[in-house]
Amino acid sequence: MTHTIPVPKTAAPSPSRHDQAATPPHVPRPTRRRWRDRAADPVFNVLAIGMLLVAIVVILYPLYFILIASVSEPSEILNGNVWLWPQGFTLEGYARIFSDATIIRAFGNSVLYTVVGTAISVAAILCAAYALSRKDLFGRTFFMLLFIITMFIDGGLIARYLVVRDLGMLDTIWAIVLPGAIGVWNLIIARAFFENNVPAELREAAQLDGANDFRFFLQIVLPLSKPLIFLMIMIHLVANWNAFFDALIFLNDESKYPLQLVLRNVLIQSEVSAAGGTGALDSYAAAQRLGELIKYGMIVVSTVPLLIVLPFMQKHFTKGALLGAVKS
Amino acid sequence: MTTETSTRIIDSATETDPSAAPTRRRGRVRAGIRRALRSWQLYVLLAPAVAYIVIFKYWPMYGAQIAFRDYNPALGFAGSPWVGLEHFVRFVNSFQFWRLIENTLTLNALGLLIAFPVPIVLALIVNQLQSERFKKFTQTVLYSPSFISVVVVVGMIFLLFSPRSGIVNNAIVAFGGEPVFFMGSPDWFRPLYIGSDIWQTAGFSMIVYLAALTAIDPALHEAARVDGASKWQRIRHIDIPGIMPVITILFILAIGNLFNLGFEKVLLMQTDLNLPTSEVIQTYVYQVGLQQAQFSYSAAIGLFNSLINLVLLLTFNWVAKRAGQSTLW
């Protein structure tokens, strides 16, 4: 099933067609000459770099604005004075956030769910992917099919909810960390990694030395697979930290809410109710001068843990995307 | 231990006998079982994942039959009374039906048409950059929003587009316009949804295309440059054909998910006021099923939705195959 991205056959003839167009160098050709033959293509470069700069600003500015708004005086934001620098610097929003019991508990819950969920997912995926990477596994095709089918057919939201309910997992940590534990796509990536990076000769040698499958997997395969393990941990850390939907449907007990769900209630629900009518609007604004500030601050607080790990991930993420791209 | 040796003897005996085909097949199965027994540890490694997939994927698939029944928790999935297509008929005849179909289709098709080309264009441009440092910096910036959670992105939309204090409305007012209540307007739901989707995901999707672009033989570019091809021409005649297989496959996958895309985000962006455009099939399933506990009815709607997805996927895969493009299988 493996196939690398083919260099398409159609690409080869194309340059030669232009080759013919370019051979008489002195004859001026009015057609198709506009962008032609300037080694550096200045127009292209200006347009391309211009476009990318616009894209970079479009991406970064909202994030930057949230950051400066979270430390600015709410009235200054309201009047539209905050756009390049913070105005009326204040840390009140953060002070409120870090003294709020609900938010701190939710933060703790999120850390717990993320760590436990990541540990379960990564362990299960690595073990299964290794077994499936072994060509001598009897029933390998059957098991692969068992997993791949679930990528295309799905029991649906309601049945999933009922199963979790029947298992008695509602309002427990298990409803958060188990139902989405294994992504088949990640399993396929991990399997491909083992197939390409663990030579069969190595296993034969280890077997001669008396190592069984467990020992070989733990002591030889895993140490060889650090980039993969790292990638898997990162993918799951981010996904688990950002997840909110399973918590929304499986948790009723507010003391078990993860941060994303609390965020949703603070950022989105309150805004909707507040935006109902102008009368309610004014009283809301008056009652919660800090409301705005807390919202900006909470976005920062919930996103910063990820931005801290981002630099570590970037090399591995590119690699992982590549791995995913070359697997069919 | 003795049984194992004896089976091995039998196996080797049957395997050396080429004339008896059925015996040989039985021998192969037995050899497989013997191999399986010897590598039982591999099955131990596989067990948690298989248990997971059976419990959390196949059991719900089995449970999806409640779409044809009147689900009663006491009687279970298979014990509830059979009602056939009643729920489907009710859904198709409900006044919500066409509105849901229209909203789902418009939002996702529009999103696909507008958002799908963006990462390709970005990848083609970034790929042409000469400075490695600028290239790396651009990549990092462009994909950084994909690490931000949906909740935060939607929260940011609510804040930035807020009619009272949002910076967008501040800018509109500063230029002499009237403030717009973006989140309360059915007309603005789709642009905001698609725009923020591009903002969040285009950079990450770009990486896949960039990876595909690096797989193109540099000699092709070299030759084209010697022949005087401009960057535009090289992009058009080398890069785009070169990543076409990847584009096709990702497009088919996107089509297959046409009715699935970004349901969580739609749910988050819904307000009472933008419901005329923001109510899609899946949010309706959530609302009817989990909030009103009409399990069977909403399961039927969900199944209807998955069915459309599967048909779309198969159709487009077939079309791509007919067109001689790479396909999923």
Image: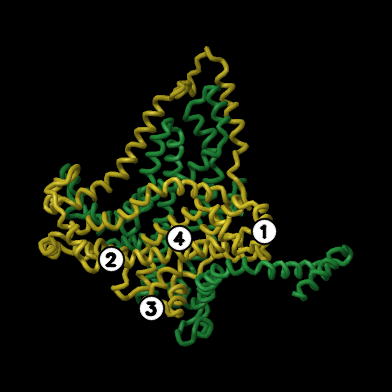
The chain identifier of the residue carrying mark 2 reads A
Q: Residues within 10 Å of mark 4 (few under 14, many from 20)?
A: many
x, y percent for residue A47: 37, 31
The residue that disc 4 covers is B259
Quadrant position of residue A141: bottom right
- Residue found at x 37% / y 62%: A243
Q: Colour of chain B?
A: green
Badges 1 and 3, same chain: no
Asked if residue A78 shows in the view, the reply is: yes
Q: What is the residue that sits farthest to the right in this orientation? A: B19
Name the colour assigned to chain A in the rendering: yellow
Vertical relation: A46 (above or below) A207: above
**Residue at which label 2 appears:** A262
Check disc 3: other Cα within 10 Å, few if <14, some if 14-19, many if 20+: few
Give the farthest residue toward the front: A209
- Check disc 1 and report the residue beneath it: A209
- Disc 3: host chain: B
Q: Mark 4: which amino acid?
A: Phe
